[in-house]
Structures are given as structure tokens and as C-alpha cells.
Amino acid sequence: MSTPTDSPSAADDRDPVQEARDYLEQALAALDRLREVLPASSSMPPPNTRGSESS
């Protein structure tokens, strides 16, 4: 409240496209972390298991 000119200048200085890019980069990083933590078999059944059973 003491410096009302800082808010508009900060908004003008900040590119909304860059904000969206930063947000998407954070979301992608979070998804990458989830991929490492979650087991891959839950999202995709391993094809090797079926092949070895029928052989």
C-alpha cells in the first residue's frame, strides 16, 4: 500500500506468456517426478509378461 506504483510496474514488467511458460515448466517437472515415483506397470501392462506366458 505504501508504494502503489510498484504493482502496476511489476505487472507491466512481467510477461503473461512467460508466466504461463514458468507454470507449465513447473507442472512438467512435477509430472516427471511422479513418473519416477509411480510404478510404470500401473499405467501400462508389461508386454513381456504376456509373451512369455504364451510361449
Image (cartoon, rainbow, N blue to C red):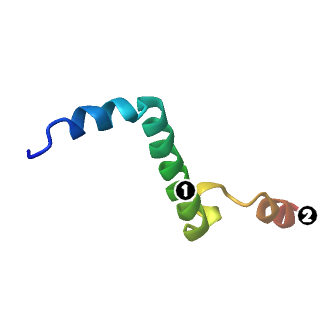
Q: Residue 32: x and y, percent?
A: 59, 58
Please, what is the three-letter code of the amino acid marked with disc 2? Ser
Label 1 neighbour load within 10 Å: few <14, some 14-19, many 20+: few
Q: Which residue corresponds to the image point at 59% horizontal and 55% vertical from the top-left?
A: 43
Q: Give SS at disc 2.
A: loop
Q: Give SS at disc 1.
A: helix
Quarter holding the C terminus?
A: bottom right
Q: Residue 19: x and y, percent?
A: 43, 38
Q: Which residue corresponds to the image point at 64% horizontal and 63% vertical from the top-left?
A: 40
Q: Nearer the viewer, mark 2 or mark 1?
A: 1
Going by the picture, which residue comes out furthest to the left? Answer: 1
**Near-viewer residue (47 or 11):** 11
Vertical comparison of 11 with 44: above or below: above
Please, what is the three-letter code of the amino acid marked with disc 1? Ala
Q: Which residue is mark 2?
A: 55
Distance of mark 2 from mark 1, alpha carbons? 40 Å
Q: Residue 52: x and y, percent?
A: 85, 66
